[in-house]
Structures are given as C-alpha cells and as structure tokens.
Image: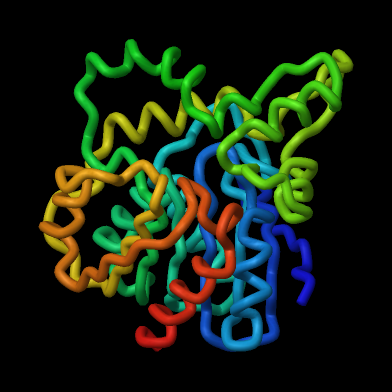
Amino acid sequence: MIPIRQTLVKSDIQLSYLEWSQGQEPLLLLHGLGDHALVWSSLGAYLAADYHIVAPDMRGHGESSKPEKDYSFESAIADLETLMDKLGWSSAHVVSHSWTGKLAVIWAKKNPQRVRSIVLVDPIFIWKMPEFLKATFPVLYRFLSFLKGMGPFASYAEAEQLAQKLNQYQGWNELQQQVFQAGIEQKPDGSWGSKFTIAARDGIFEDVMRVPGFTSPIDTPALFVKSDKGLNRQEWQLKPYKTNLNNLRLCQVPGNHWPFLTEPESFNRTVAAFLAECK
C-alpha cells in the first residue's frame, strides 16, 4: 500500500506526514536525526492492514517547516500531540529510532496516557550530557554517518556517490535510493544538500544534551531493538533502559543502526510481533 502525503498546519509550523489508513489501531513512526518519514516505507507497508499508521517528518526535516529555533523535546511532543488530535487519536503505539527514542521515553513519562507502547530502535543519548561535551559536537557532526550526507555538494552525483558509502545505505537497494533522493535538494546557490537543516541539527543536539531521558521508572510496555552492528553493544548502554523501563523486552535483529533500511524483513517481523502483543 502506498502512503498518502498529508500536511498538518499549526500556528508556528507545517508538519508533513505520510499516512497508511487501511487499518484501525493508531501507530506513530518517528524517524531519527537527519532522516525523514520515508525511511519507514517497508514497515508501513508491512503493517498497513492492521494499523492506522502515520509517519511525520519531524520539524526541521523532510517536507516539514524549518524554523530557525525551537527544537526542544517539548515542541516536538506538542507537534505529535496536535497531530494525534487532528487524527482523533487519544493514544497511539510509538516506534522510534535513535534520537526520537529519547523523545519517546520523555513523552511516555510526561503524558503516559498518550503512549500505548514504545519501540526503541537503537536509541542514543538517553542520559543528560555533561556540559563539557558540547565542545565535542563539531567533531561528532563530522563523524556521525547520518550527518555526513548533509553537504554541501557540488552536484547531485557527488552527493549520491557519498551516500552509497554511508551505513544507512549499505546495499544501495531501491528503497534506500528513494530515501536518499527524497531527503536531498538543490540549494539556491546551485549546490546540493540535505533537507535537514543546520538549525535543526544544532537545536536538537542542544536539547539532547540538556534534558535527561529517565528521571523515574516508566510502566509503558517497551521493546528495545538492538542491532547486530548498532550503537548499543555494551551492557552499560542497556542498563538505564533495564533499570527504568518496568515493562521492557529486549530483542536483537541483524543490521546496523538502520535495520529498517538494511535488514527490513527481520526488523518488520520483530516489530509486528511486539505490537500484536500490545493490542
């Protein structure tokens, strides 16, 4: 099933989203930093018969508005709750990746009545970060795979050549090509670069550093999806989730930080099985 592109108009921004409306059970799919809703194409099609699925481009990403400031968790959660209100949803299951894994945990603590269950796909930065780490952000921006594709690039061909070497596009299949193409644009000066903005990158990292993910235990049913070659490989990385999520399940799937792009079949089955148990 092909999703339909929709737009939510708020007073401050417009939020673009993909919608698979064949099923009934509400399900939100939240992409990670620098990505956009199309990364969930395979999972959305796989679950479409049983769920009413919405995958937004988070503010600063994809086809959504790109404000110069206000990239706090609070604003992102407000966007999602406004979107749910428009859809007539009082609550939803939430699948989150990377940075939005932290967002989902904060949301489940802040407004538990909104979140039926959470799937955390290789989440990162769960703790509040020490202030001195802010000085390392420029290094992180150059190192992290999902930020290397921001550009600028002299041509589309140069951007695509780099993309084929990035972890999220290992295998360079049709879906990955579509995701890459939907996330890049030609700039007014003729160069090419990501639709994800520097203002969004800096604003999100600022709040990721400032706000702790866990402040007390959470009872929401949760699945932690650990990838073979993902970022969460050590026990100390899993400990905060095991400690603070009272209803946690852990599973391991093949692939890297983007299993939904690199090993979608196994990933889709894993998520479907968990969500079926949470209905």
Q: Quadrant of residue 92?
A: bottom left
Q: Nearer the viewer, residue 230 or 248?
A: 230
- Residue found at x 85% / y 26%: 157
Residue 30: x percent and y percent?
A: 52, 56
For residue 206, above or below residue 169? above
Q: Going 41% across and 38% down the picture, which residue do you hit? A: 72
What residue lies at 16% left-to-right and 50% top-to-bottom?
240
Against 197, is 170 above or below?
below
> From the image, which quarter does the N terminus lie in?
bottom right
Residue 51 seen in render: yes
- Horizontally, residue 60 falls left or right of residue 180, namely left
Determine whether, in the image, residue 270 is placed left or right of residue 221.
Answer: right
Question: Colour scheme in the image?
Answer: rainbow
- In the image, residue 144 lies at what x, y percent? 48, 27
Of residues 2 and 174, the one drawn nearer to the viewer in this rendering: 174
Is residue 9 visible to us here?
no
**Residue 21 in which image quadrant:** bottom right
